[in-house]
Image: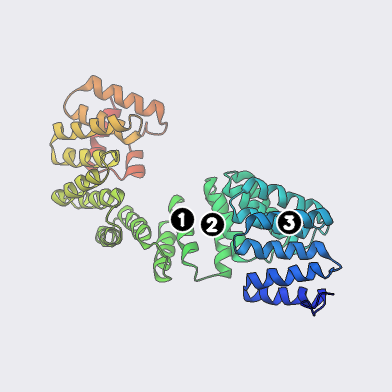
Amino acid sequence: MPDNLPYSASTYHKRGLVYNNRKEWRKAIEAYTHALELGHPNPHLIYFLRAGAQLEIGELSAMNSDFAESIRLNPLDPLVFFGRGIADIRQKDYKAAIADFTEAIRLDKRQADPRQADAYFWRGRAYRWSGNSEKALADFSQSILLNPAQKTEIYAERAQIYQLLHDQENAIPDFDKALQISPNNAYLHYMRGLSHVIESHFELAVEDLTKAIEYGYGQPAPVYATRGRIYMILGELDASLSDYDEAIRLDPHKPRSYNNRGFTYLLKNDFQSANRDFSQAITLDPQYFYSYTSRGEMYFVQGELEEALSNFEQAYALNSNFPFVLAGLAVAHHALRHYAEARSFWQRLITTHPGFENPDKLRSEFQSSDAFLEEARKVAAL
């Protein structure tokens, strides 16, 4: 035994674990190296542990070499494949991560082992981050099946996959479970609030968004903007304006916030303020066609029909298939007695967007004004 290595391999192994817990990675690597030099009886484990420490300090080449050596020495240990999968995730190599977690799952025959549930969870994350929502959902569900007593993350992850798949009916119960575990999680309240918005559960959405603000969500501007839109839908226009004011104060560069605040002003017949906000949205993003449609409706309500038509035409140049753009052109042309054009655009609307045969859908989808809706009904009767 060399004089400078006075301790046993087992002692250096244990010292390495202590350094790991202290996050003293270089000292851990040194201890593991001594354990290997002294002939530790389980070298594949030591290579595995040293690889993990090397990951933490960014020595990726050495890390990959140690993982490979650990697997060469014992190709049947699922823990090593799991650990390398985590390293793959950290390096954003999701394809490699999926392969490693798959091997860990294949090797781990203990079906009820929580570690296998973890492997499904992390493989689900790798699938999610590589854009495969369906496989992510399957893995998250399998992880929960293997270990129902999960942490917040698994239910939150699966809920967000359900959101991506437009399945709010299953997303909301998973958010409920996640929030039972972490009731003060601002992000989860915000995300569940978005699901409630999509499902038109507006009062529940307001509750969640308010809690997201109270619990200190790190990006409050979109929370205020979303709650402001709900208040607008509910007809609580002053509350809506207050929330949009705060959203714009926190983030003055989002055209959507200006557009929606402008529309709230339009509903209050404050045309000057509405026009100011629509124009500011367009200044921030000249391609933001929504504000041309909003400004077009504002001019229509004021009876400035040529200006209304001009704005709808500008919106059409940017997005020729958006339903409210087609409706706006039909309505403006009809009010100007351009009946052939009105009929043509309305026919395009109901052909490409089923459901708008009933003009009242303009109110439910876009909160259109009474004057606009009345004219739309006339177009539909042509």
What amino acid is found at the position of numbered circle 3 in the picture? Phe
Q: Is residue 223 above or below residue 35?
A: above
Is the residue under label 3 in contact with that under label 1 (CB below 8 Å)? no
Q: Residue furthest bottom?
A: 6
Residue located beneath label 2 in the image: 172
Tell me how far mark 3 sits from mark 2, CA to CA: 40 Å
Identify the residue at image location x=21%, y=27%.
333
**Mark closer to the chain start, 2 or 1:** 2
Under circle 2, the secondary element is helix
Q: Residue furthest top?
A: 340
Residue located beneath label 3 in the image: 67
Whether residue 74 is visible here, answered yes or no, is no
Tag 1: Cα neighbours inside 10 Å, few (<14), some, or many (≥20)?
many
Identify the residue at image location x=81%, y=53%.
72
Whether residue 133 is visible here, answered yes or no, is yes
Tell me, for residue 196, which label it has, or none: 1
Q: Is residue 64 left or right of residue 317?
A: right
What amino acid is found at the position of numbered circle 2 in the picture? Ile
